[in-house]
Image (spheres, rainbow, N blue to C red):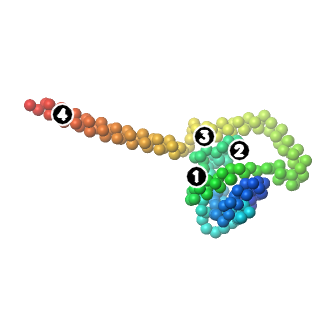
């Protein structure tokens, strides 16, 4: 758990404004899950995350679509994020965490220096060039396909609409059955002399 908290704190270190926002929730226990990774801790007054005992007050359960959306530069779908516990706290933490992006060039510059880090960054961009751009577009298309055209799970709104349609159909069938019973009774009365 300590390594995961350290990784999140490293990202927070690259974003002082985000850390200041997180500090507003000092003393609150939060959890973030993106299988197979699970992270939980308490927010410090400086906006860091520290290990703690007990269950988180709020937890964000992220589906892999969130990671794919982040890689492709898209906003994650609401169905890819499940808020548990104190939903207001979870929503605020989710908004804050969404602002975090790893600055790999900054980390590399600490090892090899600024000039070399920028050269490596340029080399990597050049290496991927058009292939990287095509790969990015394919990833965006794949994410959209998984969400819209071949969803693995039904969206909550779709399930609610289906259940509502089934209820309406059942009520209509009940009314039709009562109407048929009434018509059959009238027909039986007309046949009797």
Asked if the residue at tag 2 contacts the one at tag 1, i.e. Cβ–Cβ closer than 8 Å, the answer is no
* Mark with earlier residue (1, 2): 2
Tag 4 residue: 186
Q: Quadrant of the C terminus?
A: top left
Work out whether residue 3 or residue 54 is closer to the camera in this orientation and state it. Answer: 54
Q: Position of residue 101 (x, y in %)?
A: 74, 49
Mark 1 and mark 4: Cα distance apart in space: 56 Å
Task: Classify residue 66 as left or right of residue 10.
Answer: left
Work out whether residue 82 or residue 2 is closer to the camera in this orientation and state it. Answer: 82
Task: Classify residue 124 as left or right of residue 187.
Answer: right
Q: Residue at x 78, y 34 (%)?
A: 130
Mark 1 and mark 2: Cα distance apart in space: 20 Å
Task: Classify residue 124 as left or right of residue 149.
Answer: right
Residue 36 in sight in this render: no
Q: Nearer the viewer, mark 3 or mark 1?
A: 1
Q: Quadrant of the N terminus?
A: bottom right
Dot 4: few (<14), some (14–19), or many (≥20) neighbours within 10 Å? few
Q: Position of residue 85 (x, y in %)?
A: 56, 59
Mark 3 and mark 1: Cα distance apart in space: 18 Å
Tag 2 residue: 71
Q: Nearer the viewer, mark 4 or mark 3?
A: 4
Asked if the residue at tag 1 contacts the one at tag 3, i.e. Cβ–Cβ closer than 8 Å, the answer is no
Mark 4 and mark 3: Cα distance apart in space: 56 Å
Q: Residue at x 51, y 43 (%)?
A: 157
Tag 3 residue: 146
Q: Position of residue 73 (x, y in %)?
A: 70, 42
Residue 82, disc:
1
Mark 3 and mark 2: Cα distance apart in space: 15 Å
């Amino acid at each position: 758990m300590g390594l995961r908290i350290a990784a999140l704190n490293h990202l927070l270190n690259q974003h002082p404004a985000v850390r200041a926002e997180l500090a507003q929730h000092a003393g609150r226990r939060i959890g973030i899950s993106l299988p197979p990774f699970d992270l939980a801790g308490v927010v410090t007054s400086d906006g860091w995350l520290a290990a703690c005992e007990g269950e988180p007050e709020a937890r964000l359960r992220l589906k892999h679509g969130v990671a794919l959306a982040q890689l492709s530069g898209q906003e994650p779908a609401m169905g890819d994020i499940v808020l548990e516990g104190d939903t207001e706290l979870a929503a605020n933490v989710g908004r804050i965490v969404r602002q975090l992006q790893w600055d790999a060039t900054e980390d590399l510059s600490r090892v090899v220096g600024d000039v070399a880090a920028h050269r490596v960054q340029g080399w990597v961009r050049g290496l991927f060039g058009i292939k990287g751009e095509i790969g990015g577009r394919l990833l965006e298309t794949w994410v959209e396909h998984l969400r819209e055209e071949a969803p693995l799970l039904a969206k909550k709104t779709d399930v609610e609409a289906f259940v509502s349609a089934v209820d309406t159909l059942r009520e209509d069938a009940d009314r039709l059955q009562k109407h048929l019973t009434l018509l059959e009774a009238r027909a039986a009365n007309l046949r009797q002399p």
